[in-house]
Amino acid sequence: MKKRVIEFNDYSFKYHSQTAPTLNNINITVYEGEKVLIVGPSGSGKSTIGHCISGLVPFSYKGEVTGSLKILGRDAQSLDIFTRSKIVGTVLQDPDGQFIGLTVGEDIAFSLENDCTDQMTMKKLVEETAITVEMNEYLPASIHHLSGGQKQRVSLAGVMVDKVEIILFDEPLANLDPATGQYAIELIDRIHKETNKTVVIIEHRLEDVLHRHVDRIIVVDDGRIVADMSPDKLLSSSILEASHIREPLYVRAVKYAGCEVKEDMKPSQLHSFSIESCKDKLLDWFKAGNQVVPKEGKSPALDLKDISFSYAPGHETIKGITLSIKKGEMVSIVGKNGAGKSTLSKIICGFEKPRSGSILFNEQDVTGDTIKERSLRIGMVMQNPNHMISKHIVFDEVALGLNIRGVPENEAKKQVEKVLKICGLYPFRNWPISALSFGQKKRVTIASILVLEPEVMILDEPTAGQDLRHYTEMMDFLAELNRQGMTIILITHDTHLMLEYTTRAIVIDKGRIIADKQPSLILTDSEITSLANLKETSLLVLAKRVGMKEPKAFVEHYIAYDREVRKKWQ
Amino acid sequence: MAVEMLSYIDRKSPIHQLTGVTKLICFIVWSSAAMLTYDTRILAFLFVFSILIFMISKIKVSEVSFVLIFILVFLFINNLAIYLFSPQEGVKIYGSSHVLFEIAGRYTVTIEQIFYQCNVTLKYFAVIPVALLFIVTTHPSEFAASLNKIGVSYRISYAVALALRYIPDIQRDFRNIALSQQARGIDMSKKEKLPIRIKNAASIIFPLILSSMDKIETISNAMELRGFGKNNQRTWYRARPFQAGDYVTLAAFGLIFVTAMVVTFHDGNRFYNPFV
């Protein structure tokens, strides 16, 4: 019998700030050397489980605990946060916020410093740990200059230097582009195999985590454990669907085709998935469907002509970009971190002045217009809602822009209420914004821009940090606005989002446009996907495995079908 | 990119070579000397010497110009206030009165007052370059280590170092927030009336506090999870041993301090009086 490392017994937890318990009578046992994935929609309590293991609950986040939690056989209450940190190493979600040291070496050494390790031993240990995560070349480098994937490696090294028994990853894939995310999962897998430590991953991007083997998946919904089984068994059930967690797309497609997924078909990884028995059904399903016709272009809404821009002389962030976006289009701008996507959106909104080139709006030159003048036509929703919210109450926040424009109070009230209803925020109109979830806050920021009735709306990562249900709500809502004629530009990492909702994708790499065509064409071009750190969708791999002649059309068919199915949720 | 004021500027210079502890001690000694003395000759020497050090550091004036202007404005206000509240201070100190012209009542302009206020200004001028240098040439991680070495609790040292480190981050946030508010029509340019501009600026402060609170929560969790605050002491990965340059610098600064004090106090008065 293997050693029990983490044991939750009838464990419940209620935050002091909340009225209802976040965790309800949960029972989980994790054994030594296991690799366990915890999934669940936002607000399900999965992060709280992580906090309980790391010790942030109850030491930083206070609340009432009932039941018991044992770590390495010892009662968790008796282990203070420092003892706990020697057993459990936690890699937090925020890739930037969790760095304490300024350089790689310093950050890895942080916990050794706190242990009063002498400098010689410390340097040696840091070097050793850095080698495990392949960062030994970068010890003197400043953390701010690293890529997303490198940062992840540094934060992993920072907890591994302590020789912990359990490594806990809290949403390791958040903020990583698809290719970097894939690399992170490979790294976690390698570390797990080499060190045989117990690994717990909390994440809602299930398909991405399943890129490598996991022993067990625990599904949390509404503070309860709804499943605790092997990935193959879980994927052959309907539990994920019931909890609104996105199944791997290829599994979904097979299910849509009316084929029963069984445990012995090994659905957890596409390359091992035996789909021979489903082949005919998939082909039939594809034939039965109709094709999506891309929208035809109208007059241009926004034209960029040879735009160049640099933050510092000699380093051009944007190099001669020419681009035309038609009225009523919904396009996505993709590319790896630092490719210049956000900078480009800032230039469009007038936050930054281009060094050369011109911007045309409805064929009128607006290059010289101020931010305020441009804001009459172009609305920008930033990635971090906390950067936008400046009022206490939802209604006031949405009304702010209208008040400033001097719209009469009655008129403003009508418009705000209308927008709140569209955004599904009407019931919350008198709530303090601080009581809303991240996704709701994001919708408040969208509402506050929407009420100003811009003709073009730019959204930076609109679905980051949202589970499938909120993702669908938000995107369907944007798609509806688009149907009513609004031009929408999305900046995103999410391959599926761009495939599912946009008719055109613009790929930026090193400040240049390297591709501008239908998303399905981009995702089938391996040269572009690797330059932009994108990932080939598993649907395409599936279609090829089944031997379809038009794999791209299959992907489009799936998307159209899936959208219809998900409409029934609301 | 945001104007990054008061953050570490990386150069290769003898000043950067010195350990953080040396720079901290020198800074304290230097400001004590400048604060204690009113001897114009000493102040002038300190001022010239601090300019010299500034030149050695290879830091350009333009890199610190924002803070510099900020300080100069305050200095000007300070001078005005001294005159308003105490127009005869110079006369009291130097015991003579050479009136240049009269304004009203006790508000006369005397050479003594001008001389006194020049001394006050000179004090600032002698300290400003050294203070700025200390901040922009000390690597933030070494900063905490040096505070800790001279006896400040490491918790406080780290708090100060973190605060300094977050200045560029907060400036970046501030800029992002300001832009997003302007994009909703909040005008912060000169086209708007001042009271409205002040009210509008408040709409930046609220989100700035929110996002900073988020940062604080994350970083304090991260620190706690890695054992910060467990022991009464900690070691420092980046601590550097003293080198010859450090000893020489400390000795030189010690000498300057002692000389300055001797010259200042040998006649039993902090002031140098050219009027006798």
Image: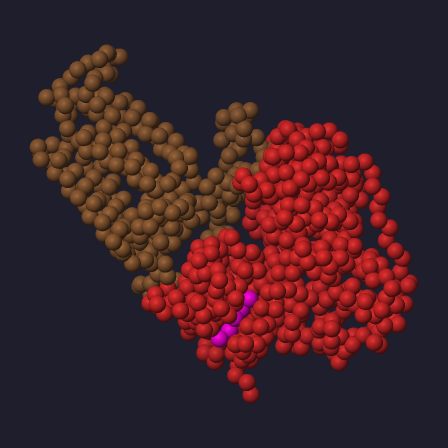
Quadrant where the image shows the C terminus of chain A: bottom right
Q: Does A299 sit above or below residue A286?
A: above
Q: Which chain is brown?
A: B
Q: How many marks?
A: 0
Instruction: Identify the residue at horizontal 44%, vertical 58% (top origin).
Output: A140
Q: Which chain is red?
A: A
Magenta stretch in the rendered image: A165-169
Instruction: Identify the residue at horizontal 78%, vertical 63% (top origin).
Output: A540
Horizontal side of A357 relative to A523 (left or right) equals left
Q: Residue furthest bottom?
A: A1
Q: Does A234 sit above or below residue B211?
A: below
From the top left corner, tell me how far across and down residue A200 is, in percent: 56, 71
Instruction: Identify the residue at horizontal 75%, vertical 65% (top origin).
Output: A538
From the top left corner, tell me how far across and down residue B161 is, in percent: 38, 51
**Picture quadrant of residue B36:** top left
- The reply to whether residue A110 is visible in this rendering is yes
**Picture quadrant of residue A421:** top right
Q: Does A112 sit above or below residue A443?
A: below
Q: Does B98 sit above or below residue A492?
A: above
Q: Nearer the viewer, residue A12 or A82?
A: A82
**Picture colour scheme:** by chain
